[in-house]
Amino acid sequence: MTTVETSRRIRVDAPDAAAAFALEQRLAHLHPAAVGRGTDWCVELEDFDDRLDEITATIEHWLREIGIRSTRMHVDRDVTTVVAHHPEQTPLGSGYDSTGALEHEP
């Protein structure tokens, strides 16, 4: 029996060198490479283990962290836009005392 190993080439556009190296560090376990061509920067990697969802989630978090709304991700010959969704976050501890158990506390 012969197994065929398939992989996807992924390239993520980055706004500058610092952002490219930050994404490279976040994806270090997948062995990416930050690549600069003139003033254009990107991060390139191969996805051997079908981890595209993980990679996309990491890119979304990276976008939020660097304050950029979106970027392009090239997967083989396809191009998609990854958008940084800002999750609704409630303050830590909100709803903790929904039963009123702490009403007697000063």
Image (cartoon, rainbow, N blue to C red):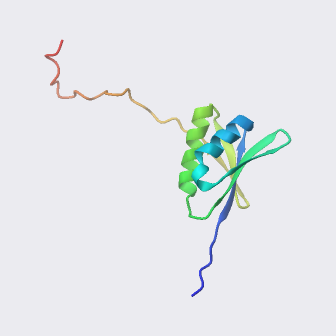
* Relative side of 61 to 104, left or right: right
Percent x, y of residue 16:
74, 36
Q: For residue 41, which quarter of the picture?
A: top right
Figure label count: 0
| Above or below for 100 versus 20 | above
Let me know if residue 70 appears in the view.
Answer: yes
Image quadrant holding the N terminus, namely: bottom right
Q: Return the residue found at the far bottom.
A: 1
Give the residue at the far right of this rendering.
38
Q: Residue at x 61, y 42 (%)?
A: 83
Looking at this view, is 32 or 53 the one in front? 32
Q: Residue at x 17, y 24 (%)?
A: 100
Q: Quadrant of the C terminus?
A: top left
Q: Position of residue 102 (x, y in %)?
A: 17, 21
Q: Nearer the viewer, residue 31 or 70?
A: 31
Q: Is residue 84 visible?
A: no
Relative depth, front residue between 33 and 104 = 33
Residue 54, image x, y percentages: 53, 52
Question: Which x, y percent locates residue 47?
Answer: 62, 61
Instruction: Examine the rendered structure and indicate whether residue 18 appears above or below residue 33.
Output: above
Q: Quadrant of residue 23?
A: top right
From what the image shows, is residue 96 above or below residue 24? above
Q: Is residue 95 left or right of residue 26?
A: left
Q: Could you tell me which residue is drawn at 61 percent across and 38 percent down?
A: 63
